[in-house]
Image (spheres, rainbow, N blue to C red):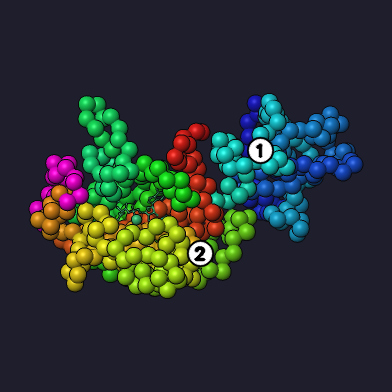
Amino acid sequence: MSEKNPNTVAIQALPEHVGQEVSIAGWLFNRRSKGKIHFLQFRDGSGRVQAIMGKGDVSEELFERCAHLPYESSVIVTGTVAADERAPSGVELKASGLEVLQEPTSEYPISKTSDIGPDFLLRHRHLWLRQSKQHAILRVRDAVITAIRNFFGERDFVCVDAPIFTPNACEGTTNLFEVEYFDEKAYLTQSGQLYMEAAAMAFGKAYCFGPTFRAEKSKTRRHLTEFWMVEPEVAFADLDDIMDLAEEFVSSIIQYVLEHRRAELDVLERDTSLLEKVAAPFPRISYSEAVSILNEKGIDFEEGGDFGAPDETALSEHFESPVLVHRYPSAVKAFYMKRDPEDDNYALCVDMLAPEGVGEIIGGGQREDNLEVLEAGIDKHGLPREAFEWYMDLRRYGTVPHAGFGLGIERTVAWICGTEHVRECIPFPRMLHRIYP
Ligand code: 4AD
Ligand code: MG
C-alpha cells in the first residue's frame, strides 16, 4: 500500500490550491462516463469533488479500469485543481493519475437506486455513516458538542465527569439497566445530576457530559436506550436562574450551528428560518397554563398527570420558539425536586420544549435542599436510603439552594437537523431490540 503523498490535501481545502497539482485520498462514490471522459465523484470525509479523467490523460489501462471501478473503492487521485463555478465545492480536479488502494470485494450494499428501508440501513449503520445526509447530521452533532463545551468554558463552569456505574436510581426505578458489579448490583447511570450536585458544592458551577442509559421499552421517535446528556448544576441558583441559563444556552448552540454548519443544513434541506429566530428570552408558561392551552386545542388532558408525547407535540407546535414549561405537579416528578413554597402540590422544575413538534429537550429545576424533606421524598418514592447517604451528606454539610438541568443531545440535534427520529442523531443508536452494529 502506498504512503499518502505529501501533496495530499483535504477536499474541503481544494479551493486554496487552484492551478496546482495535488492528490486527494478518499473513496469513489459515483461515476458517469461520456465517450472519452469519465466524471468520477470522490469523497474524503471533509467534502466531495468531481474529477474529470480524459482518455488521453492517463494510461489506457487505468482509463479502462476506471470505467468499472466499483463504488467505495479506496483511492488516491492526483490531478490539477481547476475553479468551476457550477460545482458545489467550487472546484474540480483534472485527473492525471489514480491509485487504487482496495476494490470492494462485492457490490456496496447501500446502492443509490435500490429502495432500502430503515431496518436495513440501521443494520448497516457502519456503512450508512458515509451517506451525505448521515454525514451532515453527525457534523451538526459535532458542532453542537463544540458549542456546548465553549458555552460552559466561557462561563467558568468546570467539567466534572459523572460515573456510569451507580449504586442508585436517579430518574425512577422503572427504566433502570441493572448490571452485576462483582457481588453487588449496580445500575447504568440515568443521569449524572446527583454527582453534579456534589460537584456544584465543590466548584460552584459544574457540568458533566456523557452517555446516560434508560431501559425504555417504548418505541418512539424520541427515545434511545443510550443517549448523551449535558448537565450543568449551579450552587446558589434558583428556578429562575436556571431558566435564564437554559435559554441562553440553547440560543448559543443554535447560533453556533447556524454559523458553522450552513453547508450541512443545506444538504439536509433544512428550512432554517425558524432556527434563525431562536433568541433568548423564550416564552415561559406554568404547567397549569400549558394544560389550558391543550384544553383550548380540544385535547382532553386532565390537570395532574405528566404530558404524553402527543401533548408535548401539540404544545411544541403551539409556539414558534422553544418554550419553558415550569412547575409541574410534584407527584409526577423525581424525588429530588424542590416543592414550590407558594403551593407544594407543584415542583420548582422546568422542561424546555423545542418547536416544530420536537418536544422536550431539557428537564431540570431547583433541588430540594432541606434534609428532612429530602429524606421524606426518598422514602415516598420507595428508594433505599442507604444508597443515598452520600447524597444526603450534601444537605448535612453546608446545604444551599441550587439548581440545574439536563439537555439531551440527540433530541437537540434532531430538532436542528429537522430529522424525524433521534436514531439518526447518534453515531451508533441503541434502542429497544437494537444493539448491532
Ligand atoms: O428529563 P430528564 O429525565 O432529566 C434528568 O435526567 C435530570 N436528572 C437532568 C438534570 O436536571 N440534570 O432528561 C433530560 C433530557 C430530556 O429532556 C431529553 O432531552 C433527554 O434528556 N432524554 C432522552 N433522550 C433520548 N432518549 C431518551 N430515552 C431520553 N430520556 C431523556
Ligand atoms: Mg424529563
Residue 363 rendering spot, x and y as whole percentages: 34, 58
- Location of residue 104 by image quarter: top right
Amino acid type indicated by mark 2: Glu
Q: Is residue 223 visible?
A: yes
Residue ID at (24%, 50%): 194
Q: Which residues are magenta?
A: 380-398
Residue ID at (48%, 50%): 221
Residue ID at (43%, 48%): 223
Residue ID at (35%, 62%): 351
Q: Describe residue 43's horizontal placement relative to residue 186 as left or right.
A: right
Q: Describe residue 217's horizontal placement relative to residue 139 as left or right.
A: left
Residue 242 rendering spot, x and y as whole percentages: 29, 65
Instruction: Indicate yes or no: mark 1 CB to ligand 1 under 8 Å.
Output: no
Number of numbered discs overlaid on the protein picture = 2
Q: Is residue 214 above or below residue 305?
A: above
Residue 372 rendering spot, x and y as whole percentages: 9, 56
Which structural element holds mark 2? loop
Magenta stretch holds residue 392: yes
Q: Quadrant of the N terminus?
A: top right
**Mark 2 Cα shell of 10 Å, populated few (<14), some (14-19), many (≥20):** some
Q: Earlier in the sequence, mark 2 or mark 1?
A: 1
Mark 2 to mark 1 CA distance (whole Å): 31 Å
Residue at the right extreme?
35
Residue tagged 2: 356
Amino acid type indicated by mark 1: Ile
Instruction: Indicate yes or no: mark 2 CB to ligand 1 under 8 Å.
Output: no
Residue tagged 1: 110
